[in-house]
Amino acid sequence: MARERRGGGRSRRAAQAANAESTAPAYIQRKIPYFEVLDDASLSIIENNAEIILEEIGIDFTDDEETLDIFRDAGAAIDGDRIRFPRGMCRDIVQATAQREFTQHARNPKRNVQIGGDNMVLVPAYGPPFVYDLDGGRRYATIEDFNNFVKLAYMSDNLHHSGGTICEPVDLPVNKRHFDMVYAHLKYSDKPFMGSVTAPERAEDSVAMAKIVFGDEFVDQNCVMINLINANSPMAFDGTMVGSLKVYARNNQACIVTPFIVAGAMSPVSAAGVAAQSLAEGLAGMSLIQLVRPGAPMIYGNFVSSMSMQSGAPTFGTPEASQVMNIGGSLARRLGVPFRSGGGFTSSKLPDAQAGYEAANTLNATLNAGVNFALHTAGWLEGGLSMGYEKFIMDADQAGMLRVSAQGVDMSENGQALDALREVGPGQHFLGCEHTQRNFKTAFYPSTVSDNNSYEAWVEAGSPDTQTRANAQYKKMLADYQAPELDAEIDAKLIAYMEARKASFEDSNVG
Amino acid sequence: MARERRGGGRSRRAAQAANAESTAPAYIQRKIPYFEVLDDASLSIIENNAEIILEEIGIDFTDDEETLDIFRDAGAAIDGDRIRFPRGMCRDIVQATAQREFTQHARNPKRNVQIGGDNMVLVPAYGPPFVYDLDGGRRYATIEDFNNFVKLAYMSDNLHHSGGTICEPVDLPVNKRHFDMVYAHLKYSDKPFMGSVTAPERAEDSVAMAKIVFGDEFVDQNCVMINLINANSPMAFDGTMVGSLKVYARNNQACIVTPFIVAGAMSPVSAAGVAAQSLAEGLAGMSLIQLVRPGAPMIYGNFVSSMSMQSGAPTFGTPEASQVMNIGGSLARRLGVPFRSGGGFTSSKLPDAQAGYEAANTLNATLNAGVNFALHTAGWLEGGLSMGYEKFIMDADQAGMLRVSAQGVDMSENGQALDALREVGPGQHFLGCEHTQRNFKTAFYPSTVSDNNSYEAWVEAGSPDTQTRANAQYKKMLADYQAPELDAEIDAKLIAYMEARKASFEDSNVG
């Protein structure tokens, strides 16, 4: 098997040993139904509207002649940058070769995650240029912050993935920071991760670094990176993002094709309209992947925020955004592709009550919708502009609750507990009964964040609010952090690759 | 019609005029599916287990000879206080005469609410002896606090009910405070309300005061009060609560029969066990209502908290409690009775992030489960020990989001928005398009609590957290409060009744 030839055997085994105490599953296998707000007839209408968009209105692919040629060859009508797709063309291309479910490999095979089907993978937030914590407030993120969040995600049993641009290390040059980010994911964690998408050559660098760890052939045959390709909504893709998409597709690495929508600005204000547009954009992007490399792994994404119609600001944790997410999940299952959406969204500037309500609303919607790859599960603040240390701890705790909810209800004889009811009887208590003794350790998810103490005990502890408690937790985690072992030879090769590449071109912050 | 003879015509019309500007619906009519975590086969197992509990283990009804006689006459086996019910007896009694759906009348008919079916009625929290606000912290509640919360609930468009013991006015004698509470609901609000249940004679007082407002015959023929009867779980009811239940049933007023359970203490730790026990307790209490007055309105209740197996403290907003709530909703629909559960639960001592996460988790579960009467929707803090002013404002805002979610997705031509997509086209924005102009005012639920401003604008505003903003809101609402008109003659009669009754027995704080 290709995997065995990649030279990471020793480091894998060491990592396995280091994490032997963790019994948390590598990802969530859902055992409850999906909650679908729309019926089949309504979903068919939205699918039909997506076809109308693709056929009549079309999608722009700018600054990318090659993509125009690929679609022309596949039967689309090209008019400048505008591509119009014969009815059903994109859906047929996707359904002919898309994988309904695939494995993303981690350098520690115990951390491999299954993408699609009834599985859920919970992933840190992505993209904030700022970080926030109680001590320092909001400030620009650095590579130290980035490394910290990789470590925290590694240590969080209820997060399954190391993520990608957890925060932007703005202390590093824009055109070179991708090296340090990919390196951090490989060095400080052994969970699966995401590559760089900000330029095609950075995608190539990400693939090259992955090959150092996993081996050339293994990477060509297996997904070891998932990569976030946003559409330029409405109904447009730009050449840079699409260039990265093609690099990853050719290397058999997964892309998420995500219409990024603030409804009212990049789409109509109504959920059914947003959903049709998102599906059209997703179908266009995903069919390109399948044309570039049939069978390449991919994920259909949704990112939808509603909008304050007073100020124009994006709003989060709202019922309308949850509805669109829910429709997206239904559409993905009907199409037969994994679905990315969800997360712990909020527009709050700090991890206060608003942040809690909004994040929980979105996380509950994520579970209802059956999101397979839940980017932004932990840390997101300020509409994605800020990555919160305390918020990360709080959201990761919620992630554990999602796991419990997804397990469903234990209907075994033990779960039915008739023995306990018979033993205890009317008017007595169950605290000491045999059934309780047998089950109490696993009966209830133990929140690491909630304070359930009495008021008096809480006052005695200094009346700490949630933020204060989470602040102490993240600091303790970073103090306790132990890196998973990385084979020294591989580490040296990664560093040598980075150094050589960094030396080969000038620093730039242009983009 | 009986209603027209009650003398409240003038005050009703005045109240209607005063609230003419409000376009909020009196209650939520759900248009989305239910989300059921268990399938029919599993629900049948739980129903069967409830029958085993009723038949083999039995239910205690203490200090209440009359109830033992009623059940004996109906065919149950009596052994001391223990009642064992032949298989199917309680279910048959309930299904023979229970109302699947009924109207609770308010003194303003525009505020009438429909209980059961696909309807949701959102109700303030109930029972806390303390209040909390940012200025004063936590302190014992007074009748002034009680009146304040009645006023806030009256002014909250997204709450449909005035509730009951919104907080305990501990500055009034225990045995007389029910007069002032019922009066406050009738005087400071025109929404439907809940009567006193802490003693049968207090239930009689509640009925008498309701008759002053609605008229004797109207009360006998219509539900004007909903009343909270907790079981003494596990598998027991006490004579005081059951005495109140019988008073209300005989007067055709609705009772909620609610097993009040901290799982692990008053029930087994496992969800399927809790659900079976709750159903057995509910069936026993509800069949008593139907035996006392066939057809009397009633509601099946669930109150389930999980438990910290470290400290024994009740915990809220947890996945296990949400699962039990979900099962309860399914069981109620199968039985054919309205369902009470849900709310904005938290064990946090203040309205911080924990409160937000936990309340939102429970409110989302409330929507999923299809709760008909959602007691504790707004204000709950500290595991129900404290009623929060700011928390009330935050939860009431979430209540508005539940309404939007329950409406479902607009699949009309306008909702599909193909005209907008055609008008705008690729790469452009939708801010000014005709469809957006037509819909922007109603497109998104406008949160009153969330701050969606830019970081800079937020800092300029003084960096207020959610609690600070909600504090200002509740004070402004109380300052702006205008009472709905109450007919002076009725008001005088209510006061006269209270004064005469209060003078007829000594103050007591014994219970």
Image (cartoon, coloured by chain):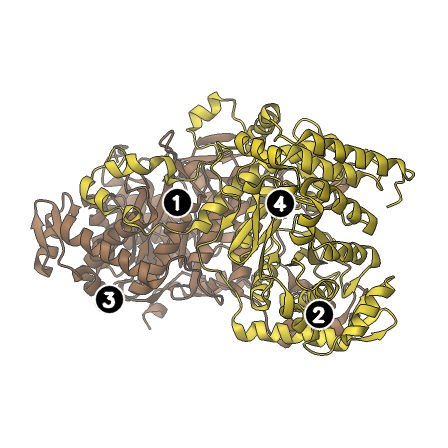
Chain colours: A brown, B yellow
Mark 4 surroundings: few (<14), some (14-19) or many (≥20) residues within 10 A: some
Query: Residue A91 location, x and y as percent?
Result: 21, 62
Please indicate whether residue B364 sits to the left or right of residue B310 in the image.
left
3D distance between C-alphas at marks 2 and 4:
58 Å
In the picture of the structure, the residue carrying the numbered disc 4 is B3
Question: Looking at the rendering, which quadrant does residue B123 occupy?
Answer: top right
In the picture of the structure, the residue carrying the numbered disc 1 is A126
Which mark is first along the chain, 1 or 2? 1
3D distance between C-alphas at marks 2 and 1:
41 Å
Query: Residue B277 location, x and y as percent?
Result: 70, 67
Examine the rendered structure and indicate whether residue A30 appears above or below residue B490: below
Asked if both marks, 2 and 3, belong to the same chain, the answer given is yes
Residue lying furthest right: B506
Which mark is first along the chain, 3 or 1? 3
Asked if both marks, 4 and 3, belong to the same chain, the answer given is no
Front: mark 1 or 3: 3
In the picture of the structure, the residue carrying the numbered disc 2 is A438
- The residue positioned 43% from the left and 64% from the top of the image is A119
Asked if both marks, 1 and 3, belong to the same chain, the answer given is yes
Amino acid at circle 1: Tyr
Mark 3 surroundings: few (<14), some (14-19) or many (≥20) residues within 10 A: some
- The residue positioned 33% from the left and 45% from the top of the image is A270
> Chain letter of disc 2?
A
Amino acid at circle 2: Arg
Amino acid at circle 3: Gln
As helix, strand or loop, the secondary structure at mark 2 comes to helix
